[in-house]
Amino acid sequence: MVVRNLLTNATVTAGGTMVIGGIGAGIYRPLRFEGVSTVTSIIVSYLRNAFDAIEANVVPYENAVFDLSSMAPAFPSYVEATKSAAAGFEDLIRIFYTEGGTNKVILMPVFNVSAANGRFYNVAGTANLTDYADGMFNKLDFALTYNSPLTGKPFNNRIYYGQLIRTNTLYTRTIGGSTNTAIQNGTYWNVANPTNLQVMAQNGTSVWGYIRYATKYPYCGNVSRRVTLKWLNSYGLYDSMYFDSFRVEPVYQLNATGGNRILSYTVTLNTVVTPDNNLALYWLSRSQSVMGVFPIDTTQWAKVTIENPAAYNVQGGTLGRTVSFKCKFEIVEA
């Protein structure tokens, strides 16, 4: 049997290994099973940290297509698993099958993060790790301290990547520097006006990517007159954006005897699509993890759900037009 990655056209056969990358909500990872005339069974097994395995049976018929992201819900995503602390993960998809009466296996390393451009720790590269076209992350001018049960420990940026074994790590150094600092999966930075960093692979000897910052506009320095969003981008880090055009509406749970409770807030955000933010807004509309700070409470990161993700495609397909995102903000009320 031949297994083909329909995105890259790469193939693998019995005893081989194919590195897949990120899997998760909104990420399509299609495989096609070819040459299955003598295959009597196929079992796709998702293993984490060599302990737990979840299995799915696939009917062996010619050119069957299987989306590996359908296995992602079997274990918590790295975003959920690192809410309180960084950690190590060894995620592996194994395809067991019987062909001509012989048991065979194919291995596929993955990582459970909805980051289409995310990479494994050992894949060097010189990319800027933001979806902004100019290669610069938005520089956040504040750092919160409240540890929310909804969003976990506060942070301004965070990094997720693939590991072949749990002890694999990336490293950071100042751009042009030589001193490396090891960073585990889910390592976060919670610093106002952060400095630029160079991410290193291969035990700190090869460049993995760059984290550079600039203040993005529209910018308003008054936290009570703006909304801030941050979201998991396509590289497995967090982009962010300020919005100075917005509307906030409470969503109430009505009580016949009075004392109505606020369940959440509907926040409508408006921004102009530019050559710089175009792709960043696209990935915001698809992001697995979105958080925000708004004038109702500027001391905590709210859990945010984009309720009209198609708004970008419908309203903002042309540069210079305004896109309006309708967002559900959930916070811990005092």
Image (cartoon, rainbow, N blue to C red):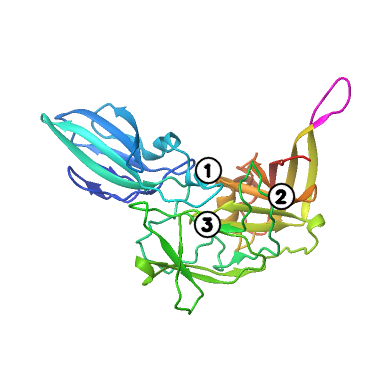
Magenta extent = 252-261
- Residue 2 seen from this side: no
Write down the quadrant of residue 127 in the picture: bottom left
Within the magenta stretch, is there residue 132?
no
- Residue 65 seen from this side: yes
Q: Are marks 2 and 1 in contact (CB under 8 Å)?
A: no
Q: Mark 2 points at which residue?
A: 300
**Vertical placement of 110 versus 278: above or below?**
above
For label 1, the crowd category at 10 Å Cα-Cα, with few meaning under 14, some 14 to 19 and many 20 or more, is some
For the residues labelled 2 and 1, the Cα–Cα distance comes to: 18 Å
For the residues labelled 3 and 1, the Cα–Cα distance comes to: 14 Å
Q: Name the residue under label 3.
A: 237
- Tell me the tag on residue 80: 1
Q: Quadrant of the C terminus?
A: top right
Q: In terms of secondary structure, what is the magenta stretch mainly? A: loop
- 102 or 117: which is nearer to us? 102
- Tell me which numbered mark, 3 or 1, is placed earlier along the sequence: 1
Callout 3 amino acid: Leu
Q: Residue at x 77, y 54 (%)?
A: 245
- 268 or 21: which is nearer to us? 21
Callout 1 amino acid: Glu
Callout 2 amino acid: Gln
Q: In which quarter of the image is the N terminus?
A: top left
For label 2, the crowd category at 10 Å Cα-Cα, with few meaning under 14, some 14 to 19 and many 20 or more, is many
- Tell me which numbered mark, 2 or 1, is placed earlier along the sequence: 1
Q: What element carries label 3?
A: loop
Q: Residue at x 64, y 41 (%)?
A: 150
Q: In this view, does 20 lie to the left or right of 115?
A: left
